[in-house]
Amino acid sequence: MEALQSLGILNLGWQSVVMLVIAGVMIYLGIGKKVEPYLLVPMGAGVLMANLPLSPISDIEQGGLFAVLARFGVFQFELFPLLIFIGVGAMIDFGPFLERPYTVLLGAAAQFGIFGTFLVAYLLGAGMFGWFDFSLRDAASIGIIGSADGPTSIYVSTLLGSKYAPSIIVAAYSYMALVPIIQPPVMRLLTTKEERAIRMSATHTGKISRRTRILFPILVILVVGLVAPPAIPLIGALMFGNLLRECGVLGSLANTAQTELANIVTILLGLAVGGMMTAMPQTITLTGGETIVMAGFLQPATLMVFALGIVAFALDTAGGVLFGKLLCHLSGRRINPLIGAAGISAFPMSARVVQKEGLKANKYNHLLMHAAGANTAGQIASVVAGGAVLMLISRLA
């Protein structure tokens, strides 16, 4: 009889079945629909293995692989998001941003979703209504979904110790893949067809000197580090990767950062996050004896996290577009307000969405380089915003 009880199929509950279906959907979207396959396939595989009945793979006491990855790569030392940012930095060309420095304002405006969603989550949880089990730290972590940046969401939510960290991470990456669906309705709602049809020069001067490209990441580390010290690890990793790309003497390291390093860490991170997505709550014990309780995935509060993630992306888009409308007015209608939507950090998907919407309104429109400038500015702004959230919450909670 004891042997029969050790069979997984006899311990298969409806919660496990639901999670296994979710795993199948994630793998299908990644392979069948090619929606962020580099993330969804490893995450889906992690969800699949972690939610099989009696699976030891997420059990830290049994030395489970996923538990070890989550403990050391995500919660204990935050290694994975920092290593991924080195790879991201090596991939990004900040040239469009440096040619159009005004786009930094659009990147800043498009972070509105972080603080707007933070406020909503707090009111629903620890604030006025108290309908969900959201502490101040949880609310701040949920708000960071609006950074539209996976590594920043991982770093902030785990550093704040949010029990909804796995759901926050999954929501951030999932909605980044859904940017072509989430953003266009908001963009059309807040602009007129005439505004969307405003033509901007497609000229790419390429006049940014090598010296400027080398000094830029160094200066960004210095400035951001002096303004928002908690953001130093993230911005430092991002800009170090970019320095590898731009210095011109470390080509092999730059290639390694954006290929082998990024690929290996993406696999491990995907498995770790998927392994944390279990139907029932689980506890992760850190080296110092501190424990982190992860909320179960099939709970009303966890589902609300996903709903608030959509709110965050919509508010980001609205903030960027509305500021774009202001710049459009101040510039005498020389700036297309659509490029403000690219101020979120979902690089380069958001810039492509802006180009597509601009072409729908005017087939001669070429907004891609302008949108790319706002998009890369948003990458920096999201990290700064994450550091600001960490500073704020460390003082309040």
Image (spheres, grey):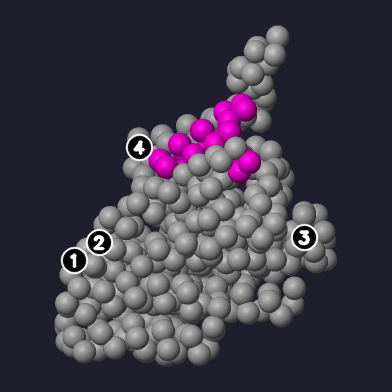
Residue at x-position 39% and y-position 54%: 265
Three-letter amino acid code at disc 2? Thr
> Who's the residue at 70% across and 58% down the image?
290
The residue carrying pointer 2 sits among few (fewer than 14), some (14 to 19) or many (20 or more) residues within 10 Å by Cα, namely some
Q: Which mark is first along the chain, 3 or 4?
A: 4
Please name whichever residue, 256 or 216, is drawn nearer the observer in this view of the structure.
256
Q: Which residue is mark 1?
A: 252
Quarter that holds the N terminus: top right
The type of residue carrying mark 3 is Gly
The residue that label 3 is drawn on is 125
- The kind of secondary structure element at disc 2 is helix
Closer-to-camera residue (366/287): 287
Tag 1 secondary structure = helix
Q: Identify the image quadrant of residue 87.
A: bottom left
Left or right: 299 in relation to 337? right
Q: Is residue 144 left or right of residue 177?
A: right
Neighbours of disc 1 within 10 Å: few (<14), some (14-19), many (20+): few
Residue 277 screen position, x and y as percent: 58, 43
Label 2 or label 3, whichever comes before in sequence order: 3
| Dot placed on the residue nearer the N-terminal end, 3 or 1 | 3
Highlighted range, magenta: 40-61
Task: Please name the amino acid that badge 4 sits on.
Answer: Ile
Name the residue that disc number 4 marks: 31
Q: CA distance from mark 4 to mark 3?
A: 37 Å
Q: Position of residue 313 (x, y in %)?
A: 52, 62
Residue 256 tag number: 2
Label 2, label 3: how many angstroms apart (C-alpha)? Answer: 44 Å
Residue at 47% across / 62% down in the picture?
79
